Image: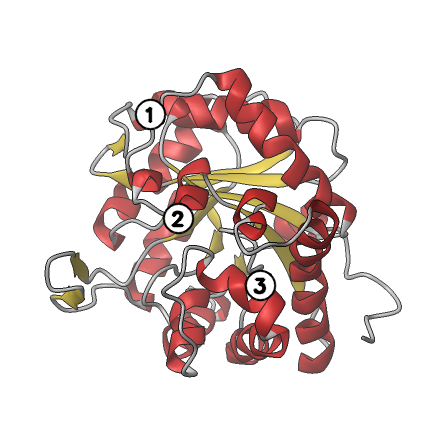
Amino acid sequence: MTVPAAPPPDFAAALAAGPLVLDGGLSNQLAAAGHDLSGALWSARLLADRPDAITAAHLGYYRAGADVAITASYQASTAGFARRGLGRAEAERLIGSSVRLAREAARQAGGGRPRYVAASVGPYGAVLADGSEYRGRYGLSTAALERFHRPRLEVLAAAGPDVLAIETIPDTDEAEALLRAVDGLGVPAWLSFSIEGDRTRAGQPLAEAFALAAEADAVLAVGVNCCSPADADRAVRAAAEATGKPVVVYPNSGERWDAAARDWRGAPTFGPARVASWLAAGARLVGGCCRVGEREIAALATAVRTPQ
């Protein structure tokens, strides 16, 4: 696989220079292309079975206007791959390959604009594949959560991403564990909580959750993802006020998942009209999560790059 001869400019410097556009939901991009994501590994299964599909999904978002692609490692772990009969070495190779696939998509996208790769670090509950990632409070100590996350973080950091996307974190216990685990890796990170209303999914006040990262040198940005756009509107200012750091925000489409019907309900509320208020409140990394696709990211990119 061919990769760029030189990396893009330093991510921290790029973030300081102006807002960056994130991609949309990787899972909906892959599902739209006809891939079955019903297993416990979700999109991470394709790291082993169809790596070309992952590269194609990232490429679609880059071409739509995204500056940053978030890798397919959200639900990837050595334990998850072990259930498929893969040993630790092969599992770690696949986890690391998520960064290389996104980097290859950046190469294929071409053009004169720098493009960045964010290595996704999902919550412990994502590996369980039982919905607990949206509840938190797994019954594990902070130390146990740190022991779980550190090996995967080390593998991803060694693969050479521009930033670690610590995302969809449901509670402060797991955030504390991840902040300890990311310290000293030599790769910057953002910390993004999954929320409902003005609290984390586990029920802690957002100001308390955001403040955990205020003094974390490795964390460049703090914010929210995988939430409703309306909740994101309120959270951006709270994150900026609690930490004084740039804010990352990438909510879902606004549709609601009906677990009984196993389908999405309601109308999307995600749209570029929200961008101006996010940027004014301190957002510097903006994008979309579940059910946000190329069309929405293209419109968002236009809004971000249009002078206000």
- Secondary structure, mark 2, is helix
Name the residue: 30% across, 44% down.
131
Determine the image quadrant of residue 195.
Answer: top left
Name the residue beneath numbered marker 1.
Answer: 137
- Going from the N terminus, do you reach mark 3 or mark 1 first? 3
Residue for badge 3: 69
Classify residue 237 by image quadrant.
Answer: top left
Judging by the rendered image, the residue that carries numbered circle 2 is 280
| Residue 179 in picture, x, y percent from top left | 57, 26
The quadrant of the picture occupied by the C terminus is bottom left
Q: Nearer the viewer, mark 1 or mark 2?
A: 1
Q: Nearer the viewer, residue 175 or 308?
A: 175
Q: Looking at numbered disc 2 in the image, what kind of residue is underneath it?
A: Ala
- Give the colour scheme of this rendering: secondary structure
Q: x, y percentage for residue 81? A: 57, 52
- Real-space CA distance between mark 3 and mark 1, rounded to the nearest whole angstrom: 29 Å
User: How packed is label 2: few (under 14 Cα within 10 Å), some, or many (20 or more)?
Assistant: few
Marks 3 and 2 sit apart, C-alpha to C-alpha, by 24 Å
